[in-house]
Image (cartoon, rainbow, N blue to C red):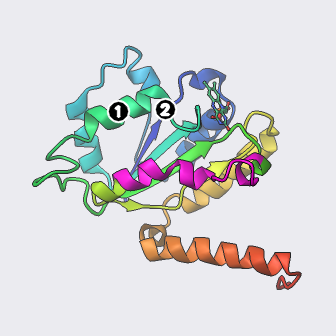
Amino acid sequence: MKLLHLVFHPNLEASRNNRTWKSQLEASGKITTSRDLYREYPDFSINVEKEQALLLQHERIILQFPFYWYSMPPLLKKWLDDVLTYNFAYGPEGDKLKGKDLQLVVSVGGREAFYTGFDIFTTVPDLLRPFQLTANLAQMNYLQPEYMFNADSAEQETIEAFGRQLTQKVDDPTRSDPRQYLYDSMSRELNQVYEDLGMAQG
Ligand SMILES: Cc1cc2nc3c(=O)[nH]c(=O)nc-3n(C[C@H](O)[C@H](O)[C@H](O)COP(=O)(O)O)c2cc1C
């Protein structure tokens, strides 16, 4: 499977999380093409033909970015607006991305307690829902998003441990099955219920 890894970070040099994960993924040899989009398009002028050609050449698209204002960095939004065009990603002839996988990888500055607490009534997967709907419209398989909380204060070892897990999963073909995604999230929730009830299996 050919993997296209697109990193959207305004200052990758100064990044701890995204830079580490990019290096780890590249070193794994599993990524076909890895790119730093802010470096490629410092003026935000995106080469749409090039981006679309790259999408066509790969089967799994990985969008990696830091969570900014409960959403995405602006170049990623522009990339979506410019590249996922009518009759390419949607519309009567817009089936060019059909069957491809969309994998999100997100560093989240906030703590898990904030996003799971009852005070905000939402979760990171909920806040990422626009990507899921976009994938749906483009007939892509939306894979379970990978994200790490507490990104700003995480120890380097924690960042690398996340990167190692990511590297293991990133080319797993079973993740392309949406039923696997459902199964994974349901079993995680069930396990949490068992744990809360003190019935966790050893
Ligand atoms: C402009 C800006 C907006 C941010 N918005 C959020 C946010 O809405 N929620 C959050 O949890 N963290 C937020 N953060 C923290 C980033 O998610 C965090 O710094 C980043 O994931 C760290 O990754 P890095 O080490 O690769 O830079 C924001 C940071 C910046 C600079």
Instruction: Residue 149: give x, y in percent of width and height.
Output: 72, 46
Which quadrant of the frame does ligand 1 lie within? top right
Q: Inspect this view and state whether residue 72 appears.
A: yes
The numbered dot on residue 8 is 2
Q: Is residue 29 left or right of residue 152?
A: left
Q: Residue furthest right?
A: 198
Vertical placement of 194 versus 121: above or below?
A: below
Label 1, label 2: how many angstroms apart (C-alpha)? 10 Å
SS at mark 2 in the image: loop
Q: Main secondary structure of the magenta part?
A: helix
Instruction: Residue 22: give x, y in percent of width and height.
Output: 57, 39
- Amino acid carrying label 2: it is Phe
Q: Is residue 121 magenta?
A: yes
SS at mark 1 in the image: helix
Q: Is residue 158 magenta?
A: no
Q: Cβ–Cβ below 8 Å for labels 1 and 2? A: yes
Q: How many numbered marks are there?
A: 2
Vertical placement of 177 versus 109: above or below?
A: below
Q: Inspect this view and state whether residue 2 appears.
A: no
Name the residue located 69 percent from the left edge and 51 percent from the top edge: 162
Q: Is residue 38 left or right of residue 138?
A: right
Q: Which residue is mark 1?
A: 79
Instruction: Residue 6: give x, y in percent of width and height.
Output: 44, 39
N-terminal of the pair, mark 1 or mark 2, is 2
Q: Is residue 161 left or right of residue 51?
A: right
Report the front residue among 99 and 22: 99
Vertical placement of 188 versus 116: above or below?
A: below
Report the front residue among 141 and 136: 136
Instruction: Residue 122: give x, y in percent of width and height.
Output: 63, 52
Q: Which residues are magenta?
A: 114-134
- Amino acid carrying label 1: it is Trp
The numbered dot on residue 63 is none
